[in-house]
Amino acid sequence: MKKQWWKEAVIYQIYPRSFKDSNGDGIGDIQGIISKLDYLKELGIDVIWLSPVYKSPNDDNGYDISDYRDIMDEFGTMADWEKLLEEMHNRGIKLIMDLVVNHSSDEHSWFIESRKSKDNPYRDYYIWHEGKDGKEPNNWESVFSGSAWQYDEATGEYYLHLFSKKQPDLNWENPKLRQEVYDMMNFWLEKGIDGFRMDVINFISKVPGLPDAPNPEGKRYAPGGDYFINGPRIHEFLQEMNKETVSRYDVMTVGEMPGANVEQAQLYTDENRHETNMVFQFEHVDLDSGPGGKWDLRPLKLSALRDSFTKWQKGLETVGWNSLYLNNHDQPRMVSRFGNDKEYRLESAKMLATFLHTLKGTPYIYQGEELGMTNVVFDSIDDYQDIETLNMYREKVIENGEDQQKVMQSIYVKGRDNARTPIQWDDSEHAGFTTGTPWLKVNPNYKEINAKLAVADSNSVFHYYKNLIQLRKQNPIMVYGSYDLILPDHEQIYAYVRKYEDQTMVVMLNFSAEKPVFELPSDIQYTEKQLFIHNYEVDENEAIDRIELKPYEARVYLLK
């Protein structure tokens, strides 16, 4: 397998609105990020993935872009952004930007022109359609609830928006539109960025004719993913994009690809196909969803998590590459979801960190994860800001009369604002995020969980991450070693071995508050052992053939 810098990197995601405010307006900004680069340098990360900072009316917090070549006023200026890039590169940190080109904002100049008339030169930059029988062109449901179509009176047609009605989908069938996108990508690459994270990039190719989605329950709208996820021309579009842009630079790409399976991911990430370097797949973050989708809560089974990760580890073992994550700006906090954010917050945050950094692939840390930040429970729906959450609440509670408490419980567990509460820098008012009123309330636990305390405490989650990142830099087995599952049926322990050259790494992870026993399979032979990673005090001479693990314990040995 070819060695690459992006395989060996650890990537840190910044959601700028919630990271650090420098001017007291309650909104994180670019100067705020610059002020915390030394903190990130100390943590040891190699790359920052910056969520969108482009001009935007903020219907979906910057994922609705009105000018791809300018910076949002709330975040600063292009000069601020250029200073950020310079300061990052001075510290040996790379920058990847968010590329949002499945859709734009309805306030983008292309769309303003497009909606003026049916013969406008920009009309075909978007997907317009006549209605059918006095209704929408088809029955597709928006990801954000309701119809995926919006009627526009000016021309008497509907436009497609798979997300919010202020996020019209771009028409990738139009070669002029594609060239505009490639020119814009090259604009940023010429400025010196180090790659792109590509938002829902496997949605850009739609099935011709846009047929109705199957609707066995007879609902008004139905998920149409079969007709726009991993569509018929997706590989052609990605290969063309690669050829016209990123292939000319030493950069990385990661495609966000909901609904992509292992076989599809092999195609997307095969180095010989020149599409993307890695994908964000969603299988493991859908395991606690029921048949009703994301908000239909189900308990997570360790067996399902283990089966999913093992399938992806083996599936991309020789072709392609995995991206490793347990949370991001769209997912709840990982210690609340996969660990125990009450009694064993410290232990389970460290255990989950060990899990991510000892798998094969590139680990992604989401801001605040390195502090063990948790989900939040706000008193009222009025305290929430996320468009997906608010649309769902309106549809379920106000329009359909569903149980308000049940819906609020699903928001506490799965809502995107869990990840978006401001970073907890210290124990001062608003957790040191802002001197003003934060755009979203701070999690009330900031007095106990904050960066100032964590950096000062050698036993903190922060220092545990710092150590993991250093170990990964020094030990190629953590990056390139093979993966094989052991104890495949254990109900509390997830264990696996990695092998590279003459080394074997044994990873034992207790995903429970119990004290289960780990038994080393007899076929794992060794003459030397070294205690490598641990989140509890451990006797280094303890035999490893049979170990009673403590609640949420992580233990890793190197064997020869």
Image (cartoon, rainbow, N blue to C red):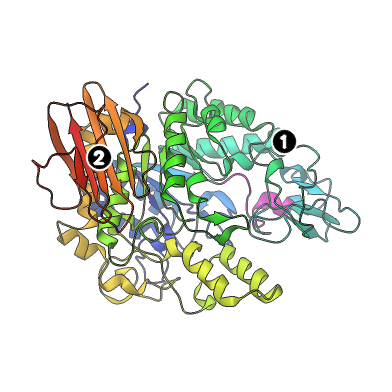
User: How far from the left and from the top, in percent, is residue 178?
Assistant: 64, 36
**Furthest residue to the bottom?**
379
Q: Earlier in the sequence, mark 2 or mark 1?
A: 1
Regarding mark 2 in the picture, which secondary structure is present there?
A: strand
Regarding mark 1 in the picture, which secondary structure is present there?
A: loop
Of the pair 378 and 35, the residue shown nearer to us: 378
**Quarter of the picture holding the N terminus:** top left
Sort mark 1 into few (<14), some (14-19) or many (20+) by Cα contacts within 10 Å.
some
The answer to whether 215 appears left or right of 466 in the picture is right
Label 2 and label 1: CA atoms lie apart by 56 Å
Question: Are the residues tagged 2 and 1 within 8 Å (C-beta)?
Answer: no
The answer to whether 189 appears left or right of 371 in the picture is right
**Toward which corner of the image does residue 57 lie, by quadrant?**
bottom right
Of the pair 170 and 503, the residue shown nearer to us: 503
Of the pair 55 and 395, the residue shown nearer to us: 395
Q: Amino acid at mark 2?
A: Glu
Specify whether residue 36 is in view. Answer: no
User: Is residue 170 depicted above or below 29 in this figure?
Assistant: above
Mark 2 = which residue? 519
Mark 1 = which residue? 173
Specify whether residue 275 is in view. Answer: yes
**Residue depicted at 30% across the width and 55% down the height:** 349
- Magenta stretch contains residue 463: no
User: How far from the left and from the top, in percent, is residue 175?
Assistant: 70, 33
**Toward which corner of the image does residue 546 lie, by quadrant?**
top left
Q: Amino acid at mark 1?
A: Glu
